[in-house]
Image: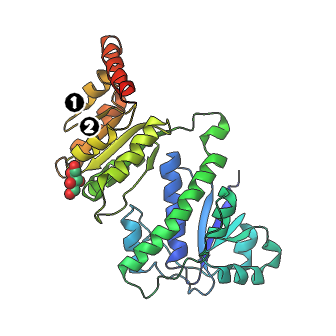
């Protein structure tokens, strides 16, 4: 079966459209936990040279999110690319107009990225439609551009996951694991995500996406709420010690977060406490140990029985606070 084809378009095909492509492919893999993407994703430039690599800053800011775009080679957009695409998403309105000048008949499938996401999600159109060219800017300018694109692309991931995700085949579309970290937990989170990808474990990454300082409660809360409301079956939270994340997550009703430093506690946290969030310390636990802890946590079931009675008492405490 031929896959639906999405083409991202910018000017030179060395920065913005490359970021969009890798963010979408990676986001879909993370969201659906599958090695085969439900769509084909490509990128091209209106004025690009052929065969140029992505700019160093583009490679850098993508690698910060775990994406390797070193194989990218720029190419110039052709009428065939437009005709062969199901959706053409441009970075600016001027790009959109240039694409439509090439193939006027493509009007029903060419949109700016922001325009498409706004209309497909029902969100209002943002005041700023264009995603500006970071060329000539420093790494931080590229990082901001990446984050602007990623915000739109993540909405696209959700739309595509709903349309082409496993639930369309009658299977459970629940994301298995929600993962989040602060700056101190970011390196370890990358190692855990690498394990998820290798093991084909479906996950959703709630950020943060770099080592720039952030506040752990902002990320801990998102993952804990995703677990509490059933979006994710389990959560994994990583800060420097794991302590701040576990304190945060345990404030959310129905969340039982366990801070683990070795696999035995992780196994017992599942067997005895039915823990649904695993917290780890990125500055204290190494990647090999962390993966063993995650494996033990995800592989172990709750034993129920006398342990359920104890959990009921914890639930009663939560109710008493309402
Ligand atoms: C950040 O420096 C650090 O305080 C945080 O990552 C965490 O360890 C808090 O518990």
Quarter of the image holding residue 225?
Answer: top left
Q: Is residue 58 visible?
A: no
- Decide which of tag 1 and tag 2 comes sooner along the chain: 1
- Disc 1 vs disc 2: Cβ atoms closer than 8 Å? yes
Which residue in the structure is indicated by mark 2? Answer: 293
Q: Position of residue 97 (x, y in %)?
A: 72, 82
Query: Which residue extends farthest top?
Result: 305
Category of crowding for the residue at label 2, using alpha-carbon neighbours closer than 10 angstroms: few (below 14), some (14–19), many (at least 20): many
Please state which of residues 80 and 91 is positioned toward the viewer in this rendering. Answer: 91
| Secondary structure of the residue carrying numbered label 2 | helix
Asked if residue 152 lies left or right of residue 265, the reply is right
Q: Position of residue 85 (x, y in %)?
A: 71, 66
Label 1 or label 2, whichever lies nearer to me, is 1
In the picture shown, does residue 240 fall above or below 10? above
In the picture shown, does residue 260 fall above or below 33? above
Name the quadrant of the C terminus. top left
Residue 241, numbered label: none
Which residue in the structure is indicated by mark 1? Answer: 265
| Secondary structure of the residue carrying numbered label 1 | helix
Q: Name the residue rendered at 51%, 63% in the picture.
A: 151
Please state which of residues 101 and 238 is positioned toward the viewer in this rendering. Answer: 238
């Amino acid at each position: 079966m031929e896959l639906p084809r999405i083409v991202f378009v910018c000017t030179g095909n060395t920065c913005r459209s490359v970021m969009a492509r890798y963010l979408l492919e990676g986001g879909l893999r993370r969201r659906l936990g599958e090695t085969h993407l439900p769509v084909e994703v490509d990128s091209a430039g209106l004025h690009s040279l052929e065969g140029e690599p992505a700019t160093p800053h583009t490679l850098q800011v993508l690698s910060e999110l775990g994406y390797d775009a070193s194989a990218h080679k720029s190419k110039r957009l052709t009428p065939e690319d437009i005709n062969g695409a199901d959706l053409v998403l441009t970075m600016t309105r001027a790009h959109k107009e240039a694409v439509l000048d090439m193939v006027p008949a493509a009007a029903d499938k060419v949109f700016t990225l922001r325009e498409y996401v706004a209309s497909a999600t029902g969100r209002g159109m943002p005041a700023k439609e264009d995603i500006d060219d970071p060329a000539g800017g420093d790494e931080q300018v590229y990082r901001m551009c990446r984050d602007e694109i990623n915000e739109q692309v993540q909405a696209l991931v959700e739309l595509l996951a709903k349309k082409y995700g496993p639930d369309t085949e009658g299977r459970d579309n629940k994301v298995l694991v929600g993962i989040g970290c602060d700056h101190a937990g970011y390196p370890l989170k990358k190692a855990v995500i690498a394990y998820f990808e290798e093991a084909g474990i479906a996950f959703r990454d709630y950020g943060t996406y770099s080592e720039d300082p952030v506040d752990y409660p902002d990320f801990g809360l998102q993952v804990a709420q995703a677990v509490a409301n059933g979006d994710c079956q389990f959560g994994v939270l990583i800060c420097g010690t794991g302590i701040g994340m576990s304190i945060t997550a345990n404030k959310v009703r129905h969340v039982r977060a366990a801070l683990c430093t070795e696999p035995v506690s992780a196994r017992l946290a599942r067997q005895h406490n039915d823990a649904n969030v695993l917290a780890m310390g990125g500055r204290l636990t190494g990647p090999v140990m962390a993966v063993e802890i995650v494996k033990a946590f995800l592989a172990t079931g709750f034993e129920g029985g006398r342990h359920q009675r104890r959990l009921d008492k914890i639930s009663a405490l939560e109710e008493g606070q309402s």
